[in-house]
Image (cartoon, rainbow, N blue to C red):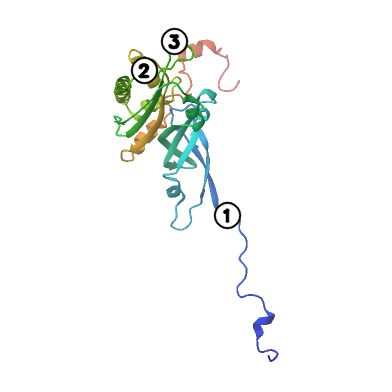
Amino acid sequence: MAVGKNKRLTKGKKGNKKKAQNPFDRKEMYTVKAPSMFSVRNAGRTIVTRTYGTKIASDSLKGRVFETCLADLNGGDEAQGYRKIRLVVEDVQGTDVLTNFHGMDMTRDKLCSLIRKWQSLIEAFVDVRTTDGYLLRIFCIGFTKKQSNQLPNSTCYAQSGQIRSIRKKMFDIITESAKCDMKELVQKFISSPESISVEIEKACNSIFPLQNVFIRKVKVLKKPKFDLTKLMEMHGDNGAEDTGAALDKAAAEATVPVLKGSGGRL
């Protein structure tokens, strides 16, 4: 091969190498705000790519689902550590991400610890609609309990007719409890002890004694059309903000001594 004919042999590759860029340089941090029914409002932080061209950061955040522990949202109550709460992003205001309730579940280890031999497991689920238009599917679970006069090694199986009666009671109580708005219903779910579970246990005691009754799972099947006013009501502090005490002018004048002087200067 003649010298100097192939000039590309002495040069590097075509095009300059792209400068390595850290992908996190193009990210922004947002604070996740939980609804006001939870005692801890800051549920965490999330990152998203900054607004670039036609791709808007807030659009990327809307619809994002977060799963967190109820113990973290209720001030570190470890007794509620088995509850998993799902929150969905509905609006972005500044660097705050406003979320709404999207579902509830139970951890697998808690569920496995409840299932034992020599007892009947009773499950039920029902679709309910709240007064503000949310369609939810609520799953309930319960277990039969030994009578006080039974021997330690005896079983406590319920008959099929008793199981049907207990399941019907579960349907009725859950449907009746859901005749309220979403905010009030979520407060029933996260209360300690659960108000719905306690009511089911009391109502079914005459049929067959129950134990370990829980709302196992909640799914949000349908939501009403997005309304910013209702979302802000759900994130409202219900007057918890400190606005100060009202000032009594007569009492203030009596408390502060009047300084004698000839004018404005003292």
Q: Amino acid at mark 2?
A: Glu
Q: Earlier in the sequence, mark 2 or mark 1?
A: 1
Label 2 neighbour load within 10 Å: few <14, some 14-19, many 20+: some
* 58 to 241, vertically: above or below: below
The image quadrant that residue 146 belongs to is top left
Label 1 neighbour load within 10 Å: few <14, some 14-19, many 20+: few
Q: Nearer the viewer, residue 153 or 31?
A: 153
Answer yes or no: do the residues labelled 2 and 3 have beta carbons within 8 Å? no
Residue at the disc numbered 2: 199
Q: Which mark is residue 23?
A: 1
> Along the horizontal axis of the image, is 36 left or right of 5?
left
Whole-angstrom CA distance, mark 3 to mark 1, is 66 Å
Considering the numbered disc 2 on the image, is that residue within a helix, a strand or a loop?
helix
* x and y, in percent, of residue 132 in the image: 30, 32
Q: Amino acid at mark 3?
A: Gln
Q: Residue at x 66, y 89 (%)?
A: 5
Q: Amino acid at mark 1?
A: Pro
The image quadrant that residue 65 belongs to is top left
* x and y, in percent, of residue 114 in the image: 47, 25
Residue at the disc numbered 3: 150
* x and y, in percent, of residue 224 in the image: 31, 38
Q: Earlier in the sequence, mark 3 or mark 1?
A: 1
How many circles with numbers are drawn on the protein? Answer: 3
Answer yes or no: do the residues labelled 2 and 1 have beta carbons within 8 Å? no
